[in-house]
Image (tube, helix red, strand yellow):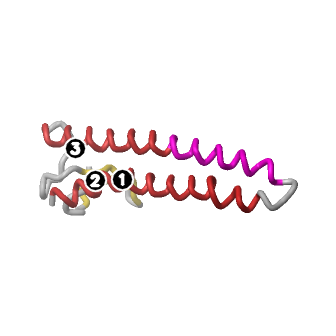
Amino acid sequence: MLERMLFRLYLPSVLVLIGGWILSYLFITTIPSTFAESKMLSALATKASLAGGNILWITYAAVALMALYSTYRFWSWSNGNECCCKKCGGVVSERNGRYGPYLKCLACSKTTDF
């Protein structure tokens, strides 16, 4: 159960990292090669490659912050300062649903009311 909880804690940061890699790849290679063929858009080709590098660094910063937040939540939970599931004791995530806010466990996927 601990492995599943850690996987769900760190999954958003991994998805942002993969999305940032794909976006920067598009901006560094695909878009400049497409724009370089046109006379009017050739100036945007160099700007797109520069933007791709910036997107990559922004992605790294966002992933680092997200991973630090996930690590802080896990540390708080292990010290007993974080809300935990009533059934298994795992870290819970606050969500808003059709009938109001509720808690979803990251370890066992059970939902409970506040």
Give the magenta range: 41-58
Sequence-wise, which precedes: disc 2 or disc 3?
A: 3
Residue drawn at x 50%, y 55% is 21
Left or right of residue 111: residue 37: right
Total count of labels: 3
Displayed quadrant of residue 76: top left
Nearer the observer: mark 2 or 3; the answer is 3
Q: Which mark is residue 6?
A: none
Which numbered mark, 1 or 3, is in the foreground of this view? Answer: 3
Seen at 44% across and 52% down, the residue is 17
Q: CA distance from mark 2 to mark 3?
A: 16 Å
Q: Where is residue 56 shown, x and y percent of the image?
A: 52, 46
- Disc 2 and disc 1: Cα gap in Å? 6 Å
Viewer-nearest residue: 96 or 75: 75
- Measure the C-alpha gap from mark 1 to mark 3: 18 Å
Q: Residues within 10 Å of mark 2 (few under 14, many from 20)?
A: many
Q: Give the main secondary structure of the magenta stretch.
A: helix
Q: Dot 2 corresponds to which residue?
A: 103
Q: Give the residue number, with chain letter if any, for mark 1.
A: 95
Q: Which residue is mark 3?
A: 74
Bin the neighbour count of mark 3 within 10 Å (Cα to Cα): few under 14, some 14-19, many 20 and up. Answer: some
Marks 1 and 3, the one that precedes in the sequence: 3
The picture places residue 67, in percent across and down from the top left corner, at: 34, 44
Is 54 contained in the magenta span?
Answer: yes
Check disc 3 and report its element: helix, strand or loop. helix
* Pointer 2 with pointer 1, Cβ within 8 A: yes
Q: Secondary structure at mark 1?
A: strand
Q: Which label's residue is closer to the chain start, 2 or 1?
A: 1
Q: Quadrant of the N terminus?
A: bottom left
